[in-house]
């Protein structure tokens, strides 16, 4: 019947039997709604573990639906919701384990307490009378044993001694019965043991069947599942934190290497720029030296030319034409030198291309 109902729900929907008015206010429940138990979706709900036990948590106030759980497992958003639901379950389980550990500590303290044996109660009048009678009999028998021993009747004396021993046992039983009962109760109390998983008290060295019955019981298995999940969850979180720390360290190392690489690249560019600047400065200095040398040469030629003109005034007319020709040639050379000095860049390039160790 349930299988047929589930099949109809799958084919026609869970609202197939509702009227039109009921369907207007009906909202289909989905696995990510607040009314759905996230603990049940991702693993288990602690409310289902301790039913009809001393640790029963009652009915879960949220929805547990296997179809919703199946829908959650097939959803493309499954992986993104698992951490959220696991965190909810871990919080719930931590509270349960915290309460249980407090109960376990109290149980340990109870077992560790030393049971003080109270002093024996006073002997009643009836027992006092019995003791007096026993002591009188023992005294008489001891006198008879002594007389028989002196007479050499060893067998009779030994028989009376056995009677004395029996009377002494009766006397001890009368005087120590309450104390023996108390010691027996203390010994029984010390045989109790405590289960560290679920906090239940057990009888030490109990029968294997009863021990197995406890281990397979709902309370023991339920708290075992809770503790196992918490241990697994904490290990996964610790592993994730460690991986995140290693990733941060790796990223920091890569950033450091990148900064070193950029610094090295900038340093090389700076060195190259400095070399170019120094080379340009050296070229400028070399060009200035060539210019200064050309100016000195030009001034020397001009001085030599003026001296030649002054010497030509006192010479013959017949040498005037020759002198004029030489003067015109010198003027042409000076004009060419001036044009070179007016073009320092071009002149500097031509001069700089020459070796500085070969001045013209």
Image (cartoon, rainbow, N blue to C red):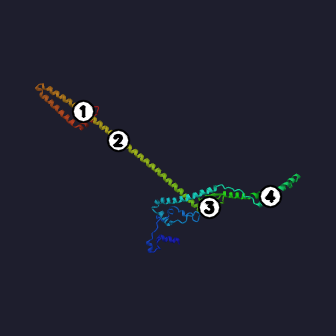
Secondary structure category for the residue under label 1: helix
Estimate the spatial distance between the alpha carbons at disc 1 and disc 3, rounded to whole Å: 113 Å
Q: Picture coordinates of residue 292 (x, y %)?
A: 24, 33
Q: Please identify, in this view, whether the residue under mark 1 or under mark 3 is nearer the observer.
A: 3
User: Which residue is denoted by mark 4 in the rendering?
Assistant: 132
| Category of crowding for the residue at label 3, using alpha-carbon neighbours closer than 10 angstroms: few (below 14), some (14–19), many (at least 20) | some
Asked if labels 2 and 3 touch by Cβ distance under 8 angstroms, the answer is: no
User: Considering the numbered disc 4 on the image, is that residue within a helix, a strand or a loop?
Assistant: helix
Do residues under tags 1 and 4 come within 8 Å of each other at their CB atoms?
A: no
Q: Which mark is residue 292?
A: 1
The image quarter containing residue 199 is: bottom right
Q: Residue at 20% across / 30% down in the picture?
A: 299
Label disc, if present, on residue 214 of the rendered structure:
3
Q: Tag 4: Cα neighbours inside 10 Å, few (<14), some, or many (≥20)? A: few
First in sequence, mark 4 or 2: give its number: 4
Residue 51 % position (x, y)? 57, 65
């Amino acid at each position: 019947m349930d299988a047929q109902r589930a099949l109809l729900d799958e084919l026609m929907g869970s609202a197939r039997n509702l009227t039109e008015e009921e369907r207007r206010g009906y909202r289909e429940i989905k696995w990510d709604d607040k009314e759905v138990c996230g603990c049940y979706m991702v693993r288990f709900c602690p409310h289902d573990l301790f039913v009809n036990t001393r640790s029963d948590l009652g009915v879960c106030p949220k929805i547990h639906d296997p179809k919703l759980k199946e829908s959650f497992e097939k959803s493309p958003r499954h992986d993104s919701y698992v951490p959220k639901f696991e965190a909810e379950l871990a919080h719930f389980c931590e509270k349960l384990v915290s309460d249980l550990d407090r109960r376990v500590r109290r149980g340990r303290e109870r077992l560790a307490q030393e049971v003080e044996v109270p002093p024996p109660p006073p002997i009643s009048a009836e027992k006092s009378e019995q003791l007096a009678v026993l002591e009188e009999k023992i005294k008489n028998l001891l006198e008879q044993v002594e007389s028989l021993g002196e007479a050499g009747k060893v067998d009779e004396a030994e028989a009376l001694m056995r009677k004395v021993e029996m009377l002494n046992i009766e006397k001890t039983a009368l005087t120590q019965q309450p104390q023996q009962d108390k010691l027996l109760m203390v010994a029984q109390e010390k045989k109790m043991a405590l289960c560290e998983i679920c906090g239940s008290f057990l009888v030490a060295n109990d029968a294997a069947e009863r021990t197995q019955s406890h281990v397979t019981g709902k309370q023991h298995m339920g708290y075992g599942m809770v503790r196992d999940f918490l241990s697994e969850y904490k290990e996964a979180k610790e592993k994730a934190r460690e991986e995140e720390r290693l990733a941060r360290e790796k990223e920091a190392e890569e950033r450091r290497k990148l900064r070193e690489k950029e610094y090295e690249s900038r340093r090389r560019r700076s060195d190259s720029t400095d070399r170019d600047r120094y080379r340009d400065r050296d070229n400028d200095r070399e060009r200035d030296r060539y210019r200064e040398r050309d100016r000195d040469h030009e001034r020397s030629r001009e001085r030599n030319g003026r001296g030649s003109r002054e010497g030509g005034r006192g010479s013959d007319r017949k040498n005037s034409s020759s002198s004029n020709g030489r003067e015109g040639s010198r003027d042409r050379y000076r004009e060419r030198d001036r044009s070179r000095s007016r073009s320092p860049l071009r002149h500097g390039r031509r001069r700089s291309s020459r070796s500085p160790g070969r001045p013209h």
